[in-house]
Amino acid sequence: MKHTQRCPKCECSSLLFLREIADATAAFGAGVGAWMLARLPDGTTRGHVQALICRGCGFTELYVYDPDSIPVDGTVVTRVASPQTSPFR
Ligand SMILES: [Zn+2]
């Protein structure tokens, strides 16, 4: 949908882009913040989530604006092996 500018479910071309998605878990504190996808062991958050929404059917795709900001630590965040190197074929 991001590249075609068209919904893959209903073919509608009327789309909305959300630059920030409200994080409902933050609503219990001082206010609603932007939804960050990864919470790291040091308490910081990374991975600013954005969305494309189809106005025709409501289908929604999520994207991380800055995926390189999420460090691979092997515990919270692991790298997915490509099919050529994965032992799970
Ligand atoms: Zn749609």
Image: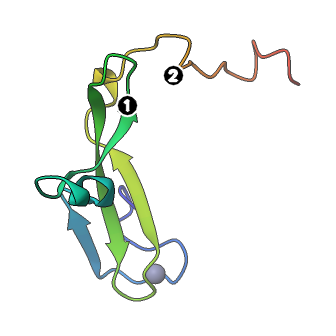
- Residue in view at x 56 percent, y 19 percent: 78
Q: Secondary structure at mark 2?
A: loop
- Image coordinates of residue 61 in percent, x first then y, are 43, 61
Query: As rendered, which of 72 and 52 lies closer to the eye?
Result: 72
Q: Is residue 73 above or below residue 8?
A: above
**For the residues marked 2 and 1, what is the alpha-carbon distance in whole angstroms?**
8 Å
Q: Hey, what amino acid is under mark 1?
A: Arg
Give residue 59's position: percent from left, percent from top: 47, 75
Image position, residue 74 (x, y; %): 55, 11
Q: Secondary structure at mark 1?
A: strand
Residue at x-position 86% and y-position 23%: 88
Give the image quarter of residue 46: top left
Give the position of the C terminus as an image quadrant. Answer: top right
Q: Which residue is mark 1?
A: 39
* Residue 49 appears in the picture as rendered: yes
Residue 67 is situated, as x and y percent measured from the top left of the image, at 34, 30
Q: How many marks?
A: 2
42 left or right, relative to 31? right
Question: Is 47 placed above or below 21 here?
Answer: above
Disc 2 to disc 1: CB gap under 8 Å: yes
